[in-house]
Image (cartoon, helix red, strand yellow):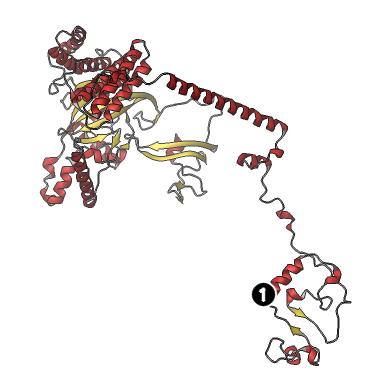
Amino acid sequence: QDFAASGWWGSPGAPKPSQGRSPGRCIAMPSLKAKKADESDRRKPRPASAVAPGAAGHDDPAMTGEFCGSSGTSSANQPAPASKFDRLDYSRFKDIGVDSKAERAQTGDITWDELSKEEKAHVWSVEDQMETILEQKRQEEDDWKRQLKDRPADLSWVQGRHFASYEAFCVGRVESTLKKSGNEAFKRGDFDQAQQDWDAGVKMLLALGNLPPDALALISVLRNNLAQVCVKRGEWNKVKELTDKILDRDYNNEKALYRRAQAFFAFSIWDRCEQDLESLLRLHPGNKDAALMLQRVQDKLGRDRRRLAGKAVDDIAAGVEELSMDGTVRKLRIEEYGEGDPDERPQWIKQEWLSSGREKVVVTCQMIIWSHGGEELYNSKEYRPRPDTKQARDELKEYMDMVNFLDQEANKAPRLVGDFYQKVKKRPVRWYLGDPGMYKGFDMAARSMKRGERALFEIDQPALSPSVDAFYDKMGFHSGIAGLPQLVYHIEEERLAILEDEMPEDELDLDNKTQRGVRAELQMLGYIVFRDVSANGDGDKLHAVLHPGLPDAPVIRRGDLLRGSFFINRPFDGSLLVQNQYVEWRLGEDEGKYEKLGDNKEPLRPDGGAFVPRCVGRA
């Protein structure tokens, strides 16, 4: 109705109020540009008399777009509207986003004026220290430059010599500088400097790539010198490693043979020591030190031969010792002697540990098992997961062909199949002696060993799976679930993969390829005596205190709130089944309760806490 009375100002031909029309009420629609200008003006402070015309008691026309007007009427005498009350309280946002002095000090945003007197003194002290260090470094650099200027490089070894190639120049340089300085350091007893010089010479020569004969000969000399340093320090593993590299290229090297024999003597590997010394004396019969060591080794082996009634120690068919009455377990040889006298029998085993007493001994061993054909069936140190599909095997074969081609182009030795598989670390094998769930052959082998000993055994099939089948059948599950290696149906994996791709499975004749016996290397790492807390003394529950805990702490009882950590492994191969670093639960009440899996697939209780198996509560 207001529009009908007064018309629309913005429409074409519409009359304006000054043209004699009766006054009316209109709605103004200002442009966006005018609106923004009005808003900016409104934000500026202004006196009360500067209020825009409009009826008193109404809001700002620029804000509402509404005004009242009549012809011939002025609003200059209208009273100023009261300031509008802001209903929003912004005080709670004060100081938000403002960091404290400590926070700004950590990020480096603090100013010098904000620091206290002590803090300024500390800054000055640190600056003085830095300036002192920098001045010392500058002085050292000036001294070094002065020495270079006063003492030119020693090039006397080049004078009068002609080098036909860069390789020959490098050989001459190493021989005349690094080898010579290493010899001088060794004579004055500075083994660290000698090792550093000789090792630098070896690396410089190896960087040449295709080595000429004189470079190979010099590398052998330097490695022999490094082996002598390791002999002085008693680092026998490094001695064997260095001499092995020398003898791979030059098996008749006198010094390398003698020093490797020294390493075998230190390891008590008498048969290998005897072999190296005999080879050395055949080539160099005048070596008195080698002859004296050989006599000592043969005296040692003579006692073993008398104990074996004339059988040769290195005769694997005869073996060192028969461990079972039926001949299914044989100790072939000792690779590394353990603690104590090598001639004495193991004295650490107590008879009550092997009976139904209240104590059991748990042994820990590293174990590598091979077939008679040399295929590695099990390794407790590491394993290489092989591809299990034809596509994966084809991709691996393609990759192997490419790498072998590149190796041939670079004149490198061909790689073995196992080099293309990623190695995965594992845990040693653990069981208690007399455990009915462990293969009888390995249990008997461990009883014949000493702590630290590494020996080779031959175990026939009756002492493997058949010795535990009845035990696991009674329990209702397979021995593989407990972590025992499965050693029955194994042939060479790569060969079997090829056969599966070329002929049907019913034509493979797997029965004739069944593994009937194994050869195993065991290393005794140690043992722990456990208390048998089972009702029948059959080893069902074993307990050992690894740390006695606090002497004044109360005894844990049912219903107590516990906080602790636990992990559960498979009994033999040590594969981790459950691990919790920090768990809180009520003893005797929360064990065995399971509701769902968490975000990381971890089992959870109904209250959201970590799942605690019943066996942990009983323990």
Q: Mark 1, residues whose alpha carbon is within 10 Å: few (<14), some, or many (≥20)?
A: few
| Residue 302, placed above or below residue 541 | above
**Residue at image mark 1:** 32
The answer to whether residue 210 shows anywhere in this view is: yes
Residue furthest to the right: 77
Q: Quadrant of the N terminus?
A: bottom right
- Number of labels in the image equals 1
In the image shown, does 101 or 366 lie closer to the viewer? 101
Q: Amino acid at mark 1?
A: Leu
Can you give x and y, in whole percent of width and height, for residue 556 in the image?
A: 53, 32
SS assignment at label 1: helix
Residue 203 picture quarter: top left
Quadrant in which the C terminus appears: top left
Measuring from the top left, give residue 571's x and y in whole percent: 34, 35
Image x and y of residue 613, in percent: 44, 41
The front one of 583 and 231 is 231
Q: Is residue 450 visible?
A: no
Image point (78%, 74%), residue name: 59
> In the rendering, at what x and y percent does residue 128 appear?
62, 27
Whether residue 278 sits left or right of residue 342 in the image: it is left
